[in-house]
Image (cartoon, rainbow, N blue to C red):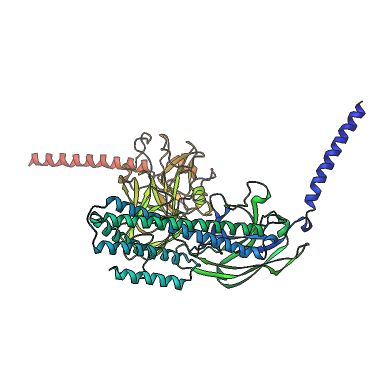
Amino acid sequence: MKQRNLLQKGGALLLAVSTALSLALPAAAASDDDLDYYVGGISENGYLIDDDDNRVDFDEAVCGPAADSDLMVPYGKTIYFPLLNDGTSGEADWLYKEWQAALSDLTDEEETLALLERRVEQAKADLDAAAGAASGEELRQAQEAVSLLEEMLLYRKRLDRGDNTIDSGSMRELLADCADQLADFGVSISQDATQTQIQAEMDHQQAVIDSALSGIDPDAARTAWEQAVADRDAQQLRVNAAEQAALEAQRAYEDSVSGTTDGYPFVYESQAVKNVKIKTDWEEGKSYIDSLSITKKRYKNSPYAAPSGSRQYAYFLAIEIEERNSTSTSTRDVWGTVSLKKTSGSYRFDYDDVQVDVTFEIGYNHPEDANVIPINPALFEPDEDFDQDSDEEFEFEADDDSYYVANTNSQKKIVLGMDTDYDDEIGDRYDYANLNFWNGNGANFNRTGYLYLYADEDDYLYRIEDDGDLTLLHPDYDHYEDCFVIRTRTLGRYMTSDRRLPETADTAQDDEPDVTVIYDVDTGVNYNPTTGGYGADGDELWNAPAPADTTTFTGVMLRDGLMTTDRTDPQTAPEGQTTPEAQTADPTPEVSAAPTAALTGDTPLAPASPTGPADANDAGGLGQNTVILLCVLAAEITVALTSLICYFAFFHRRHD
């Protein structure tokens, strides 16, 4: 029976091992032959990482057909180009571009529909507010001007966005035509006017309309409203058609990538990129490229993104941009060809088979919100991202309680950024303090402004220098804003601490410190001559009060000479001990027995047997008690002699 049980257990163990091997061996022996696809191309669309979840965001294309033409690639960032499997080669690239173009057309039609919706709302408001009087010529011209200005604003947005459905020359002709027609209605505006200028003129003409509405003809108002509704309904039909076209283009693209990969377009298995080599041919901007690599990343905002499994990842060609000056307002063009080659395996391919033409522009993008300095540096331009004013206020995305006020008159474009990330290097240096940081990108305004940093009034404020040193500042404190106020034109780096810190770089690496910490062997207390602080064993804070029985430290010997440091509290000084105030009449420094013992080399913290002032007195000079005794004797002798002289003088006068 026992033997039968052993055989059953042994058979079960053998079965488990064989099952595990049968599952493990195919995985270990995986090769190109086990793949249903190979690398067929590189996407022309490059994307950035979302810093919040470290995933490639397919909504953030910075180059390629899916990218906004005005979008820059910031310095120090990495662009990710998805590797496409062989199901996406050939016609698929063209179909993808068609899909993206259809989406762009849909966006334009939706913007026009929104404009016409606002026109209907305004016409309805005019109809409701119409009185009985007819409008004059001024009202008619203003209404025509608003209509033309709306068209002009739409053309300007398309031109600024780099819309490729209409060439820039034709777009400029449309802008010029609008400007000419507006001149006929008494509106003078340049064809090169910015979006802000066009909107301002539109608001002005709308104000003219509003002021004349009290006398508008109700019949005319109704006619205008009915026409606006008709235009809106016709545009809605165009939007519906654009939606259908975009949907059909998407289906055509997805059908082109279907087949052995089940419509999944990306490379997601490591065997597909094994032994792949990269080759580059840069025509412009090579010096701004730091590195290239093939890397696996999670991605999001794609219909193919899976919540789990191997297809939640994809392989990308990663192009890392060099970190450069974070305040530069200039841009740099980069273009060239990147090719891949696989040198071994069943699915080998040459450089000519898998390559992509890469084109992008390096620089800083505009901020999402005007007058809000983002965490990542952004390019601020006058009259677009801030107004030119003597007291222009900028908020911080990273800290909405702090802000900066500057005189921006004549201020040119400027790159601004501010984060509140904790500085680990400084934090490790002062791990006993509570620290808060403001890390500006170092931008310089033309004029000096005021930086408001939200902090407690009792905190200490430091400026962080370029080398990491700290400089203690003594700024004003605004009790209404609860902020330190710094007068500066530089968006620099600052830090607050709940306690005062040494204003030096890290001294832990200093082989020859200037100050010797003295340890009192009688009281077990350390004394720091630099800060005047006391601390018990293991206490690095140096902020404890001096114990009542702490010996007076007055002649502290440093490595570079003698430094007199009087730190005794008169209220805690031992009876009979001279306080620093009482010592002012006697310039002779005094070192009592305890610190002398500490300086004899008996403790590890003491220097090598220095000779203090007390040692010099013991060596041959008179002690302090002896000097006092001699002074007393001299005084008594003087009194006695004076009395004797007075006596003889009185006696001599009586006899005369």
Callout count? 0
Q: Quadrant of the N terminus?
A: top right
Task: Using the image as rendered, state which of residue 383 and residue 536 is in the foreground.
Answer: 383
616 is higher (above) or lower (below) than 629:
below
Question: What is the residue that sits farthest to the left in this orientation?
Answer: 656
Report the residue at 29% width, 68% height from top.
Answer: 185
Picture layout, residue 74 above or below residue 541: below
Q: Is residue 247 left or right of residue 376?
A: right
Whole-percent x and y of residue 555? 41, 47
Would residue 277 be visible to someone looking at this image? yes
User: Residue 629 at x, y = what percent?
Assistant: 33, 40
Residue 433 screen position, x and y as percent? 46, 44
Q: Left or right: where does residue 70 sit relative to residue 38? A: left
* Front position in the image: 171 or 130: 130
**Residue 469, position as x, y percentages in the image:** 45, 55
Q: Quadrant of residue 575?
A: top left
Q: Residue furthest front?
A: 219
**From this viewpoint, is residue 405 visible?**
no
Residue at screen point 33% across, 41% down: 628
Comparing 236 with 336, the one in front is 236
Query: Residue at coordinates 24% horizontally, 42% vertically from top-left?
Result: 638
Left or right, residue 59 beside residue 649: right
Is 580 placed left or right of 297 in the picture? Answer: left
Q: Is residue 145 above or below residue 542?
A: below
- Quick one: quadrant of the C terminus? top left
Q: Is residue 25 above or below residue 32?
A: above
Q: Residue at x 67, y 55 (%)?
A: 263
